[in-house]
Image: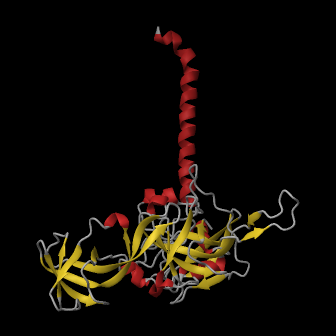
Amino acid sequence: MFYAYLPTLRPVILAGLATSLLGMVAACSTSQSRLEQPSTAISQPVGDLRPAATQQASNPAVTRAVGQVTPPPVLVNPRHPDRYVVVPGDTLWDIASMFLQDPWFWPEIWQINPQVANPHLIYPGDVLSLAYINGQPVIQIERGTAGVTRLSPRVRAEPLEDAIPTIPFETLRAFVSRPTIIESSQIETLPYVFAQDEGLIGSVGEDVYVRGTTAPAGTVFSLVHLGDPLVDPDDDEVIGYQGIYVGEGRVSQSGDPSTLLLTESAREALVGDYLLTEDTQTSANYFPRAPEQQVDGSIISVVDGVSLIGQYHVVVINRGARHGLEPGHVLRAFRAGPIVTDKVGGSRLFGEKVRLPDKPAGTMMVFRIFDRMSYALVMEATSEIRVLDKVRNP
């Protein structure tokens, strides 16, 4: 019976074989073209060393979920150099400003070189140039003379600390190496100084006694005073306190109480001071980019208590990790428009008080994140910036 149907099945079998062969040829052709075609995809952030899944989720080139912000077109600085050789003392923000009108769009145009170690970082001696691929601006990089050629399978290894920083790191060193905000949710659980030797001033070489920790001997803590409360203007809730740095101490005897030997002192340690573990965050390789989510917050404090906020001042904003903020996110400050009385309108509008639109006042980059708050460094100030001014996506 099978042989009777063979003439009928032969065309079907041949057609199936032909289709399979064509599919295999097409797949091989596609794979070969991918190998030969240079990458033109927009890269991940400079200095972004997060897991690949997290990087993809925050890459502006990836399709954005509902509620995320679609960035405006990238605008090239009309005075950009054709080629630029990176020199010691450069910052990523300054270099991005050479090529772009808005430096936070750097990740949209940065093209990494996968043949070098830490391909997202830039080092002195590297040569940057602007090119256009498929009509889109792309920053290309040529490593310095110590680098490798494109055909070499070896990579160039550079110490991470030699990479140029995003911003002048000295302006932030105290803020990234010392705890300076205490969140309200921490107060009940933090260790605290409850006694000291009578007649002694809490300074280097002296002991204070703490409760609330079972840390072993040798553990190092930072001591902070509680400073001014940080109030969220959205709901008038105290969400934290400014932490005033007191010094450092090392547990010399564990127990309840534990004995803490003061090893560094910026001011007198007092009963009621809180203990925080040392913060090891010291990276200057933040990576400027616009937030992926819509941000609408306020400046709630300025460090050092100045009334007018300018370039390189550090501010506290009432948005943090729970709002989707990450280190490197750039925000724009807005001065609230004044309220003006309408003295021209007819009987229906005359005397009505109208608030004028908010005006952009500067840009800032978030560099340290807490749950409901963040520290941000003012990068540019085009007009006066004050506490309670709004901060939004740039």
**Count of numbered circles in the view:** 0
User: As rendered, which of 117 and 273 lies closer to the eye?
Assistant: 273
Picture quadrant where residue 241 is located: bottom left
Is residue 168 left or right of 270 when viewed as pictured?
right
| Residue 124 image position (x, y, % from top left) | 50, 86
User: As rendered, which of 374 and 269 lies closer to the eye?
Assistant: 269
Can residue 106 be seen from the camera position used here?
no
Q: Residue at x 56, y 22 (%)?
A: 12
Q: Is residue 11 above or below residue 316?
A: above
| Residue 279 image position (x, y, % from top left) | 33, 76
Q: Residue at x 45, y 87 (%)?
A: 170
State the colouring used for the structure image. Answer: secondary structure
Is residue 4 left or right of 77 when viewed as pictured?
left
| Residue 67 image position (x, y, % from top left) | 58, 51
User: As rendered, which of 20 and 96 lies closer to the eye?
Assistant: 96
Image quadrant containing the C terminus: bottom right
Q: Is residue 101 above or below residue 62?
A: below
User: As rendered, which of 110 and 297 lies closer to the eye?
Assistant: 297
